[in-house]
Image (spheres, helix red, strand yellow):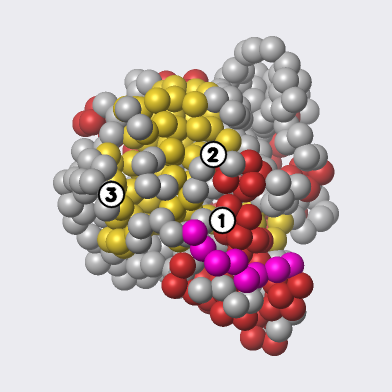
């Protein structure tokens, strides 16, 4: 019976996708104008774009037609490794506050992380919904949230990187707003989507900053991605990473990103030393052998980002919660660990963490860098890494 439901659900989703594509060649009544403003180096007056080029984010990651790609992705008919239906999670109960210079980070799942320091509770891309998609469709959670929503401490600051469903979850944002009235910071246009929940968000352009409290500032910074809630609203809202400037070392949240020109990590590092970086490592393989796609970095580029940020410590995110791509569930963290070891980096400084497990982030110390491009390339070609599906 479960198989029947899965097949029916997949067919319905494919019909919905097909109708959506049909609509894109008819009138634009499903388009949305999320932002209006002057043209800039990444906004043409109607849609945003990556100044380092959009060719790698515009086409399906495996080539061919987008409809064919979506069908293979939805049905799993591309020979992908099996994922478990569920993974057991023991939810944690974070402290109400973490005071002073201590910093504690708790991975809740996908790109959702609770970071607590200096009496401030910061939450990134909060998603507690069971499905990541419209109308209750889309990929289902394989892991429950590492912290139950009702066990979450009062949230002061929420960072929303862009408007994809696995990052901007209106149901969760509505619940957080009604309970805590946090400061929500996002990039241009996404405040329009968030506002549909009754919540209020501060929308900033790349390079703009918001003071949260004395000594604490959020800077919206460039990454390399795209945005859409539907089919005709592509790139109507901006995507971004964030640097939270803090005494004792900054917090960097990469959001959802491809590598692009690879210069954006250095732009974030210029804002001050990075004590903790939250860097995506999953959904990078849509065909055998891929090590990254235009809109998602894999473990290899994640190591490059870690190095270019000059971060003291990093936590890998964006893996193992929603099945979005081809690789096996455990491939991203296993590959990351192998790469850190093979390139001479300290695996303890950029290592997978357990869901719901509070991690004490060490005080910032300037890292000793030993990783170079040749070592990363050699590690990616190693038998150990190549064997990982």
Residue identifier under label 3: 101
- CA gap, disc 1 to disc 2? 11 Å
Please give the residue where the numbered disc 2 appears in the rendered image: 271
Disc 2 crowd, CA 10 A, few/some/many (<14, 14-19, 20+): some
Q: Rounded to the nearest whole Å, what is the CA distance between mark 3 and mark 1?
A: 20 Å
What residue is at 39 percent from the left and 67 percent from the top? Answer: 353
Residue 190 in view here: no
The answer to whether residue 163 is above or below residue 380 is above
Asked if the residue at tag 3 contacts the one at tag 2, i.e. Cβ–Cβ closer than 8 Å, the answer is no
Q: Nearer the viewer, residue 280 or 120?
A: 120
- The crowd level at tag 1 (other Cα within 10 Å; few <14, some 14-19, many 20+) is many
- Front-lying residue, 268 or 1: 268
The residue identified by callout 1 is 310
Does label 3 or label 1 sit earlier along the sequence?
3
Compared with 333, 42 (above or below) is above
Residue lying at the far bottom in this picture: please name it: 383
Relative placement, left or right, of 301 versus 156 is right
**Left or right: 165 with respect to 123?**
right
Q: What is the quadrant of residue 270 in the picture?
A: top right
Quadrant showing the N terminus = bottom left
- Mark 1 or mark 2: which comes first in sequence? 2
* Residue 89 at x, y percent in the picture: 30, 67
């Amino acid at each position: 019976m479960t198989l029947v439901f899965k097949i029916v659900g997949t067919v319905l989703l494919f019909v919905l996708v097909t109708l959506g594509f049909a609509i894109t060649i008819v009138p634009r009544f499903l388009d949305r104008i999320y932002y209006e403003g002057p043209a800039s180096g990444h906004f043409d007056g109607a849609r945003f774009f990556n100044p380092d080029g959009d060719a790698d984010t515009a086409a399906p990651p495996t080539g061919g037609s987008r409809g064919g790609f979506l069908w293979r992705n939805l049905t799993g008919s591309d020979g992908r490794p099996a994922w478990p239906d569920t993974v057991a999670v023991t939810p944690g109960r974070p402290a109400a506050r973490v005071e002073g210079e201590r910093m504690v980070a708790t991975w809740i799942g996908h790109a959702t992380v609770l970071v607590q320091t200096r009496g401030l509770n910061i939450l990134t891309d909060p998603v507690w919904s069971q499905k990541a998609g419209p109308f209750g469709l889309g990929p289902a959670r394989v892991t429950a949230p590492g912290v139950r929503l009702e066990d979450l401490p009062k949230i002061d600051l929420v960072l929303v990187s862009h408007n994809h469903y696995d990052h901007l979850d209106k149901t969760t944002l509505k619940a957080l707003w009604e309970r805590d009235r946090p400061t929500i910071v996002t990039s241009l246009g996404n405040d329009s989507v968030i506002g549909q929940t009754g919540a209020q968000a501060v929308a900033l352009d790349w390079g703009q900053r918001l003071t949260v409290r004395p000594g604490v500032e959020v800077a919206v910074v460039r990454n390399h991605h795209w945005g859409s809630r539907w089919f005709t609203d592509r790139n109507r809202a901006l995507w971004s990473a964030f640097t939270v400037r803090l005494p004792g070392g900054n917090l960097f949240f990469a959001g959802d990103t491809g590598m692009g020109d690879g210069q954006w990590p250095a732009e974030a590092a210029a804002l001050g030393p990075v004590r903790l970086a939250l860097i995506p490592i999953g959904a990078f393989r849509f065909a055998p052998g891929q090590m990254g796609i235009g809109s998602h970095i894999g473990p290899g580029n994640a190591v490059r980002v870690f190095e270019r940020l000059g971060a003291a410590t990093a936590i890998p995110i964006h893996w193992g919660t929603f099945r979005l791509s081809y690789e096996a569930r455990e491939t991203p963290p296993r590959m990351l660990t192998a790469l850190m070891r093979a390139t001479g980096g300290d695996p303890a400084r950029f290592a997978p963490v357990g869901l719901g497990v509070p991690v004490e982030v060490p005080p910032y110390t300037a890292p000793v860098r030993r990783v170079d491009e040749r070592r990363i390339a050699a590690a990616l070609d190693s038998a150990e890494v190549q064997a990982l599906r």
